[in-house]
Image (cartoon, rainbow, N blue to C red):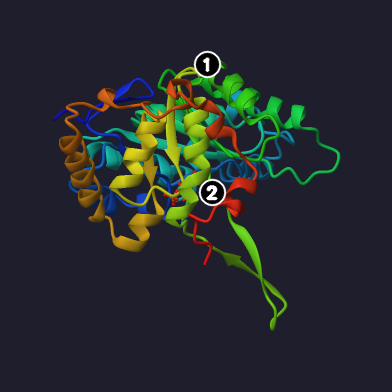
Amino acid sequence: MDLSVNYLGLKIKNPVVVGSSSLTASVENLKKIENSGAGAVVLKSIFEEEIYYEYQSILEKEKELELPDVRFLDYYDYKIKEDNIKKYVNLIKEAKASLKIPVIASINCKSSWEWSFFAKKLEEAGADAIELNMFILPSDFSLTCTKVEETYLEIINKIKAAVNIPVAAKLSYYSSDLAAFVKRVSESGVDGVVLFNRFFHPDFDIDKFEIIPSNVLSRSSDLAISLRWMSILAGRIKGSLIASTGVHDGASVVKELLAGADAVQVVSTLYKQGIESLTDMLEDLKAWMEKHGFEKIDDFKGKMSQINSPNPAEYERVQFMRYFESKKYNLG
Ligand SMILES: Cc1cc2nc3c(=O)[nH]c(=O)nc-3n(C[C@H](O)[C@H](O)[C@H](O)COP(=O)(O)O)c2cc1C
C-alpha cells in the first residue's frame, strides 16, 4: 500500500503531518514524532515580534536607525548569543541532523515589515519548507478586509522572494470572502494553504474577574469547519491543500482526504493521546483503505469533494431548518 503524497512539492511518506506546537519544539519530541510514523513535522513557530525586537534592541543599543536596515543585520548577527533566533536556527539544524522526514519551519506573522530577510536564515539552516502562520484579528474598526488581505499577500510575496524552498500559508476562516481569498492566496505563488489555524480564545474567570484561556485543545467536532471548506475548495485552487483543526483519529484523516485534502496536520490529539497515537491513526487509515480496496491515496482523494459531488448544494447548506423538522435526528 502506498500512502505517499505530495506536500508543497515535497514527497512525503504519508499524509499525516504533525503541526506546529510546543510538542515540536524539542529534538527529543521530534524523534518520537518520526518514530511514530509522521510524514513530516512543522516546528513550533518563531514570532515575527521575536525576530523584529531582537534585532531592533541591538540596533538601538548601537544608536542606529529606528527601524532595522536589513542590509546591515547580518553584521549584528555575531552579537546575538543565546537568543531566540539563534535557538530557533539551532533547532532546525539539530532536527535536520536527527530526522529523515521533512522539517518545516514556521513563522507567526501579522505584518510585512522588514523581517522577511530572516526566512533566508531558516532556509540556510536546512528547513525543507516554511509555513507562515498569518493572522490579523479583524477587530480594528478602521481596517477593511481588503487591507488585511493585502497584508497577507505582501507577506507571502516577500517570503517567496527571499527563499527557494516551498512556502505554505496557514490561514484562518475569519474572512467574508473565504473561497475567493484562499484562491487568491493559492495563486500568489505560495506552494500550499493550511486550513485552518486555531487561536487562543479568551474566557472569563467570574470570581477573579480575570481573562483565562478556553478550549486550548480542539475537539473532534471541530473537524466540521475544515471539512466543509476542504470539500468546497478541492480541485479549485492551486498548490497543496492541507487540513488542520479537529483531526483526531484515522477516520478524520480519511474524511479530510475524501474531501480533497492532500494531507492533514495533527496537534491536539497528540497532547491528549500521546505522540505514539500517530501510529494508530496511520494503522486505521491503512485498514480503511484495505477494506475499500484502495492502494494509494489518489485512489480516493477528493472522492467526496464538492466538485465531484452529484449534490453540490449539500456542502453549502447553512441553515438548520430541515434538521429541526426531521425526526431522525436526536437533538438530546
Ligand atoms: C498548545 C498549542 C500550541 C500551538 N502553537 C502553535 C504555533 O506555535 N504555531 C502555529 O502555527 N500553530 C500553533 N498551534 C496551532 C496548531 O498548529 C493547530 O493549527 C491547531 O491546534 C489546530 O489543530 P488541532 O485541532 O490538531 O490541534 C498550537 C496549538 C496548540 C494546542
Mark seen at residue 295:
none
Q: Residue at x 39, y 51 (%)?
A: 267
**Is residue 201 placed above or below 239 in the rendered structure?**
below
Contact flag, marks 2 and 1 (Cβ < 8 Å):
no
**Amino acid type, mark 2:** Arg
Q: Residue at x 17, y 38 (%)?
A: 291
**Of residues 311 and 149, which is closer to you in this image?**
311
Residue 75 at x, y percent in the picture: 53, 30
Q: Is residue 123 left or right of residue 1?
A: right
Res 274 → quadrant? bottom left
- In the rendered image, which residue does mark 2 sit on? 198
**Amino acid type, mark 1:** Gly
Residue 160 at x, y percent in the picture: 52, 19
Residue 74 seen: no
**Is residue 182 placed above or below 205 in the rendered structure?**
above
Q: Residue at x 57, y 17 (%)?
A: 188
Mark seen at residue 189:
1
Secondary structure found at label 2: loop
For marks 2 and 1 on the same chain, the one whose residue lies earlier in the sequence:
1
Res 121 → quadrant? top left
Q: Is residue 205 left or right of residue 81?
A: right
Residue 185 at x, y percent in the picture: 58, 23
